[in-house]
Image: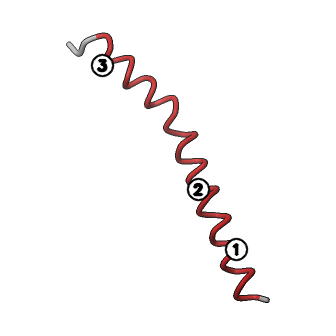
């Protein structure tokens, strides 16, 4: 049985993981958009 603080850490990481990946995707998306704009113009 995992301890209570280990369970809490796992739940907290699970709750924040989607937001972390979403912000990461947004950063990658803006970087790609900036690269495309630089090559297009």
- Relative image position of residue 31 (x, y in whole percent): 63, 68
On screen, residue 19 above or below 33: above
In three-dimensional space, the C-alpha distance between marks 1 and 3, rounded to whole angstroms, equals: 41 Å
Q: Which mark is residue 34?
A: 1
Q: Earlier in the sequence, mark 1 or mark 2?
A: 2
Residue found at the far left of this picture: 1
Q: Nearer the viewer, mark 1 or mark 2?
A: 1
Q: Establish if 34 lies above or below 14.
A: below
**Residue 33 versus residue 4 in the image, above or below:** below
**Residue 23 x/y as whole percent:** 60, 49
Which of discs 1 and 3 lies nearer the camera? The answer is 1
Mark 1 falls on what kind of element? helix
Which residue is pictured at 37% across the width and 25% down the height? Answer: 10
Mark closest to the chain's N terminus, 1 or 3: 3
Say above or below: 31 vs 6: below
- Horizontal side of 41 relative to 4 (left or right) equals right
Residue picked out by circle 2: 25
Q: Dot 3: few (<14), some (14–19), or many (≥20) neighbours within 10 Å?
A: few
Q: Quadrant of residue 36?
A: bottom right
Question: Residue 38, how many percent across, how many down?
Answer: 72, 84
Point out the image quarter for the C terminus: bottom right
For the residue pair 1 and 16, the one nearer the viewer reads as 16
Between 2 and 9, the residue placed more toward the observer is 9
Estimate the spatial distance between the alpha carbons at disc 1 and disc 2, rounded to whole Å: 14 Å
Kindly identify which residue carries mark 3: 6
> Is disc 2 placed on a helix, strand or loop?
helix
Give the image quarter of residue 34.
bottom right
What element does badge 3 sit on?
Answer: helix
> Residue 7: x and y, percent?
34, 18
Q: Residues within 10 Å of mark 2 (few under 14, many from 20)?
A: few
């Amino acid at each position: 049985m995992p301890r209570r603080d280990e369970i809490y850490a796992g739940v907290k990481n699970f709750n924040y993981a989607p937001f972390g990946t979403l912000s990461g995707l947004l950063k990658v998306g803006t970087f790609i958009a900036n690269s495309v704009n630089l090559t297009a113009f």
